[in-house]
Structures are given as structure tokens and as C-alpha cells.
Amino acid sequence: LVWFGQVVCLVTTLGAITPPVGVSCFVVAGMSPDAHAAQVFRGAMRFLPAYLIVFILLLLFPDLMVGWLAGCVK
């Protein structure tokens, strides 16, 4: 259940920065008068490979994160 929660959080944040929805990017573009949405999306896409690597590792090796979190609780 903890692993599923981690996957849901990761996918939700990934959806918040990728087009066409990209709510977070539109909020940032709206807050800055000089930044356009395209610029913000281009900047956010730099983090996409890291998100995908973590997502694949989490799917392939769920014990990595769950075991690490259990070690932090002790």
C-alpha cells in the first residue's frame, strides 16, 4: 500500500508538469509577467528524464523505496 501511494504521488506530480494539462507550469507562467507558458514547459522538461528513471526503478524494484522508508522510521 505504501508503494502504491508512492507511485500515485510520482505520477500525479509528473502529470502536473507535462503538457497538455501541466497545471503547475501554467500557474508559474501566470505568476511571472515575463515568462510564457512555452518557456516554463521547456524548463520543466529538463526534469522529465529523472522522473522517468525514478518511476522505472520504483516499478522494477519496489523494495528500494519501501525498504529505505522503513529504515528511516526506526
Image (cartoon, rainbow, N blue to C red):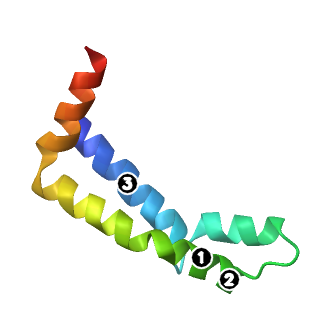
Count of picture labels: 3
Please report contact status of discs 3 and 2: CB closer than 8 Å, yes or no: no
Horizontal side, residue 10 vs residue 7: left or right:
right
Q: Residue at left 75%, top 72%? A: 29
Tell me what residue is drawn at x 14 percent, y 46 percent: 62
Tell me if label 2 and label 1 are in contact, CB under 8 Å: yes
Q: Position of residue 64 (x, y in %)?
A: 16, 42
Q: Is residue 60 left or right of residue 25?
A: left
**Is label 1 or label 3 in front?**
1
The amino acid sitting under disc 1 is Gly
Which label number is shown at residue 10?
Answer: 3
Q: Mark 1 and mark 3: span between their CA atoms?
A: 19 Å
Residue 71 visible from this viewpoint? yes
Whichever of labels 3 and 2 marks the residue nearer the N terminus, that label is 3
| Label 2 CA crowd tier, 10 Å (few <14, some 14–19, many 20+) | few
Residue displayed at 39% across by 49% down:
9
Residue identified by numbered label 2:
39
